Image (cartoon, grey):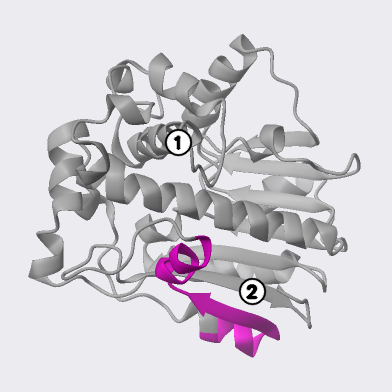
Amino acid sequence: MPGVEDGVGLTALMVAAARAIETHRPDALAGDAYAEHFVRTARVSATWPVRPAEVPGGDANPLWGRLGRYFGLRTRVLDDSLTRAVRAGARQVVLLGAGLDTRAFRLGWPPDLVVYEIDRDGVLEFKHHVLDGLATVPAATRRPIAIDLRDDWARALLGRGFDPDVPTAWLAEGLLLYLPPAAERRLVDTVDRLSADGSTLTFEVKLGPETPEVRASPIYAAARQQIGVDLLALFDREPRPDSVGHLRERGWSVTVHTPFDFARHHGRGPLPEPNDALSSNRWMFAGKSGTHL
């Protein structure tokens, strides 16, 4: 299907497969009943595993075991971050680079919430094709916006009814890793400009270029060999901007965590290992003007 079968779009299917596998684990941290339908519908991923029993080698598989559990953990942590923000008063959720995110459908939202999903037309077209076939009904008002984040997405967002005077929960999951520094700076500036006090921003980054030893990680090799995804070629390798410092200068409070913090908290998920492909990943939780995170 156009939009999801090459480049960064293909990673959306990879994450959907990981969510599907996580959903069927007896100790699942997150559930997504729609994820396996995306994987089975796209020609390129139709034979990928969507249940633990289908994973070659089980949890020892670097891709669907270790990295897959990372994606399951990330899903749970970011679900929790968004629902906390909404309980605290946010009435708009904006998913930047939404991909195959199904939070508008699978989380319990108040009836007055609006969820905006921003991504390229081909990705959203595929997503709608699958979800329409399942006769799904969103739990909140859902407004997809088909636009590339390199274009004037703020204008498109405002044109669909987004209110910059209302507290918003922003999410950039699995996005900034692939953007050049200038695009990341523009995105953070735009979020700041459009955010009322009480808004939150949750995002994921990868710190700095990785050493040759880390680049030789079994995770990267398994992704290339098992599903033809070269993650290292997709990651932007330029020095990252100090988005945390930039947000703090603008009056945001920011906390920074490693995924391992949450793996220890939940008692599941990846823990550090030598030359770890996950060691430079950070999850950032920001709140504007005294928002409690």
Does 252 sit left or right of 17 as displayed?
right
Residue 179, position as x, y percentages in the image: 39, 59
Quarter of the view holding residue 182 = bottom left
Q: Residue furthest right?
A: 112
Q: Residue at x 69, y 56 (%)?
A: 82
Q: Nearer the viewer, residue 81 or 123?
A: 81
- For this view, does 278 lie left or right of residue 227? right
The mark nearer the N terminus, 2 or 1, is 1
x and y, in percent, of residue 264 in the image: 45, 68
Is 149 rendered above or below residue 9?
below
In this view of the protein, which residue sits in the foreground, 1 or 283?
283
Q: The C terminus is located in which quarter?
A: bottom right
Q: Residue at x 46, y 47 (%)?
A: 72
How crowded pointer 2 is (Cα within 10 Å; few <14, some 14-19, many 20+) is rated as many
Q: Is residue 243 visible?
A: yes
| Residue annotated with mark 2 | 286
Estimate the spatial distance between the alpha carbons at disc 2 and disc 1, rounded to whole Å.
31 Å
The quarter of the displayed image where residue 223 is located: top left
Q: Is residue 179 magenta?
A: no
Please give the residue where the numbered disc 1 appears in the rendered image. Answer: 25
Residue 150 seen in this snapshot = no
Quadrant of image for the N terminus? top left
Task: Name which residue lies at 49% across and 43% down.
Answer: 27
Q: Which residues are magenta?
A: 245-266
Q: Nearer the viewer, residue 199 or 219?
A: 219
Q: Amino acid at mark 1?
A: Arg
* Mark 2, secondary structure of its residue: strand
Q: Is residue 150 left or right of residue 235?
A: right
